[in-house]
Amino acid sequence: MIKKKRDPRPIGVFDSGVGGLTVVKELMNELPHQSIIYFGDTARVPYGSKSKEAIKRFSLEITHFLLRNDVKAIIVACNSASAVALEELKIVSPVPVYGVIDAGINVALRETRNKKIGVIGTKATIRSESHKINIKSKEPSVEISTKACPLFVPLIEEGMFDNHITREVVKDYLTEFKTAKIDTMILGCTHYPLLNRVIREFLGPSVMLIDPAKELVKKIKLEFESYGKEKKLNDEPIEVKYEFFVSDVPDDFLKASGSFIHLEPTSVKKIFLDELEYKQVLQAEIKVSPQVN
Amino acid sequence: MIKKKRDPRPIGVFDSGVGGLTVVKELMNELPHQSIIYFGDTARVPYGSKSKEAIKRFSLEITHFLLRNDVKAIIVACNSASAVALEELKIVSPVPVYGVIDAGINVALRETRNKKIGVIGTKATIRSESHKINIKSKEPSVEISTKACPLFVPLIEEGMFDNHITREVVKDYLTEFKTAKIDTMILGCTHYPLLNRVIREFLGPSVMLIDPAKELVKKIKLEFESYGKEKKLNDEPIEVKYEFFVSDVPDDFLKASGSFIHLEPTSVKKIFLDELEYKQVLQAEIKVSPQVN
């Protein structure tokens, strides 16, 4: 069998903020020989409370930035952006664009036994009805309950992963899912898996919690492996580069990103993101010694 | 006495979002013959979790926008922007620029009896230490306690002005002010006066709550009256125009702004905010029949 030539270009990942670093972490574990360029739009975070038009505009800007950096694929780690902008990004991008909505839905449909699925996310994600429309088109008999949970992200950003206030908010938001007797819940926001424990505690062990980011990375891994894009045993060792760009560097940036991923940034510098607008950018380069699964 | 000619130019007011509409409401009540141009940066809200550099850049952009609209004065209704950007805005602006920090401090210093003052605000406001520095320079003997309360704005935006969750969060954030025995509290964020009741309930009636926006409008009223800028009895009737610009129009914009101000917007249109970046903008024009105080 002829071995296909490895494509050394990085995978581009973007999110409204640092939440998408959970996807980067998964990618680093599952596809350790892929370089990654991450962009977090920390100057305009959050997206979930903004209009569809704004989210589309922001997503297009970032997609162009990633394309200028010669990525071979783009992962939209942000559920809000995936929900409202994915189709337009696919049209403009010459490389594949992956969103998190589909990945979560596919697993939910596979896993549910009683055909009652719950979805939680930001206002923009829930209002888009992209989960509902997508699930109904694949499996019309499924009952879907959805709920926007705008307090979850601020609670997580306050580090309140599992305190009395978070438990009260979880109860307030999620009681209706108990009534609806769902057996599968899509955590439709990159931050939400950080509330896994308290959500599981409230909904009980019979409800399966689905992290779409994890599912998406699994799917991409399969694709990359089948197309020979991931490194195979006995290939020569390679250098992997991780680069992290953000549109703003708040004072607590490293602390905030530390909740998602543990990396030592090696340099902080400013660049021009595009000709139109100046952005302050953090760049961290990390050389990872090659390691074969 | 010679009557000075009235200056028909509008007052510019800006905020990171819709919270600054509380200032507009105060202005409409206190200075009913002044036209107002409001700008809410809803595409990039919130400012309180962003870096000093980002907040300065955003504030400068909006200041230039207001100046192009021929305002005679600029009110920085956002505490985070007032705390970190005011000095730079004053340098670039040919018209007076007013911030909310000073106004709150002056009243707090006048009202405190035990010289123990509390300040709550966003992360950016509290981290700037602008209240501490300013108070200490005026009255070194005063003890100041400060605390960032990042959950307050999301709670207010969820409409949770006074429920069990809000009361728990208030208790969590404000217990240390009880320990510090403050008798005066500066509500250092335009949203916070909407939590007045629950904060008062927790801190007790002996603690005076100060709304800097209200104080600033009182101060401006005095200035405008003394300079003959406000309409006087027996002047000819005048037309007043209110214009509201935002950088994004989320689906719940009217609902959200309704918490702060009750106005019927008469038109929604899009404009180019500046040569650099396209922004979607809501404009509402309201003709108010002239009325003399």
Image: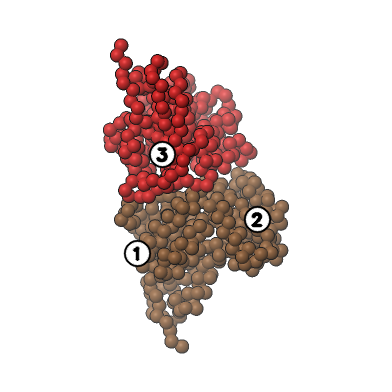
Chain colours: A red, B brown
SS at mark 1 in the image: helix
Q: Is residue B280 visible?
A: no
Q: Earlier in the sequence, mark 2 or mark 1?
A: 1
Quick one: which residue is furthest to the front in this view? A236
> Callout 2, which amino acid?
Ser
User: Where does the N terminus of chain A fall, quadrant-wise?
Assistant: top left
Tags 3 and 1 on a common chain: no
> Callout 3, which amino acid?
Phe
Q: Which residue is mark 2?
A: B145
Question: Which subunit holds the residue at mark 1?
Answer: B
Q: Nearer the viewer, residue A136 or B37?
A: B37
Task: Name the spot of residue B214 as percent of width and height, x first.
Answer: 54, 65
Relative to A2, does residue B276 appear above or below in the rendering? below
Task: Name the spot of residue B258 as percent of width and height, x first.
Answer: 46, 55
Identify which residue is drawn at 42% across, 55% down: B57
SS at mark 2 in the image: strand
Identify which residue is drawn at 53% across, 70% down: B219
Q: Is residue B142 visible?
A: yes
Q: Nearer the viewer, mark 3 or mark 1?
A: 3
Identify which residue is drawn at 34% across, 19% down: A228
Task: Name the spot of residue B94 as percent of width and height, x first.
Answer: 40, 69
Q: Which residue is mark 3?
A: A39
Quick one: which residue is furthest to the bottom in this view? B1
Q: Nearer the viewer, mark 3 or mark 2?
A: 3
Relative to B54, does residue A7 appear above or below in the rendering? above
Question: Which subunit holds the residue at mark 3?
Answer: A
Q: Which residue is mark 1?
A: B68
SS at mark 3 in the image: strand
Tags 2 and 1 on a common chain: yes
Q: Is residue B172 left or right of residue A174?
A: right
Question: Which subunit holds the residue at mark 2?
Answer: B
Identify which residue is drawn at 51% across, 67% down: B217
